[in-house]
Amino acid sequence: MPLLQQEGEIEPDRSRRYLVEGLLFSMYLVFGISWLAYAPLMQELSVAFDLSKADGGLLISLVSLAKAFVPLFAGAMAARLGMHRALLVGSCFAALAIFIPFMPNKIALLAGRFLFGVGGAIIVTLMGPMVMTWFKKDELPMVTGLNNVAVNTGITVALYVTIPASKHLGWKNALVMFGALCAGLAVLWAVFGAEGPLTGKPKATPGAVEGKPSIMEVLKRPETYWLGLAFTGPLSLYLALNSFLPLHYQLAFGLERSAASQMTGLFNLVGIPVAVIGGFLCAKLGKRRPLIIVAGLAMPVSSYLLVFSPEHSTRVVGAVILGASLFLYVAPLFTIPMELPNIDPARVALMMGCVFSLAYIISTVSP
């Protein structure tokens, strides 16, 4: 596959690019904490807001639903406003997490969660295009692998920390504390965030595109649909397991709430270093397809062991293998759009918007 050729590159300021990357990673990490912190607290939330079991599922899936429709608009917004301002809009929506625990009723709570999800949808869509303006193409696999594990790091933190935090602070104060992290990162992004000097503009080649990007232009590329389908299966599996495993472990195997949450967090925890390793292998080997295929083959077997095995040790093995497979494919898959011929960061933003929308529209039903 031809690699993106960049012309007129200016060497980015090293300290500034790491600051921007750190902010991007942190914004999506704290979003992940506030997203899944609601799952371990479902009992308290059900009492406080009179939630049914279906309502409880909506608290998680509405965030995913926002990611089904917003990414398309996020790409278009970035093309019009610039990626820095568009990401600021996203971080402000994510910062609404600080107010959601104070919602007066169930409808307001669910609406707040959807708006919170809008923020995450904007952030995840534009992270990749933004780092293209700060990092050269040979550095992108590592950075992409790291960024795509940010939300999973946050989810892991939520699954391990939420119950202890709620015992010490109360469930409402714990959620407010997590939301305050989102608000703080929004302020930091407003002050220190910026687009980098690398344009990612392709060299003139036959068939090169000119002018402003459009959604229709991206929708005409077959890569958009292949990437979307490749992302849909693992995403559906991931959302389903994170949503129902804690309660499943309590009912099927008699685990306490904290133990059930920590067991669910295990495959997230394993995936964090694997995603970084996947980025390293992707950069060193120059191969994409083998890593994606190996990960895809391991997912169904390890999922079965994790969910249905009566032996705790076997479930642990399943969690480790599943965590590795769910994250090994991330860097190879999401580096592909950045390496396509005749593409730049603005077009990558639109393509990723289409990919995320397709994947989340289908996977929203999985929880």
Image (cartoon, rainbow, N blue to C red):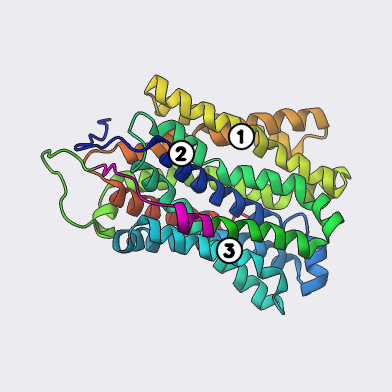
Q: What amino acid type should be assigned to the residue bearing mark 3?
A: Ala
Looking at this view, name the residue that lies furthest to the top. 285
Pick whichever of labels 3 and 2 is earlier in the sequence: 2
- What is the quadrant of the N terminus in the image? top left
Disc 1 to disc 3, how far (Cα)? 26 Å
Q: Residue at x 54, y 51 (%)?
A: 27
Give the left or right position of residue 101, taking residue 238 as reference: right
> Which span of residues is magenta-colored?
187-200
- Asked if residue 282 can be seen in this view, the reply is yes
- Is residue 191 shown above or below 338? below
Image quadrant where residue 314 sits: top right
Residue 95's label in the rendered image is: 3
Looking at this view, name the residue that lies furthest to the bottom. 104
Residue 251 in the image: state x and y as whole percent. 85, 50
Residue 346 colored in magenta in the image: no
Disc 2 to disc 1, how far (Cα)? 23 Å
Q: Nearer the viewer, mark 2 or mark 1?
A: 2
Residue 18's label in the rendered image is: 2
Pick whichever of labels 1 and 3 is earlier in the sequence: 3
Residue 149's label in the rendered image is: none
**Disc 1 marks which residue?**
271
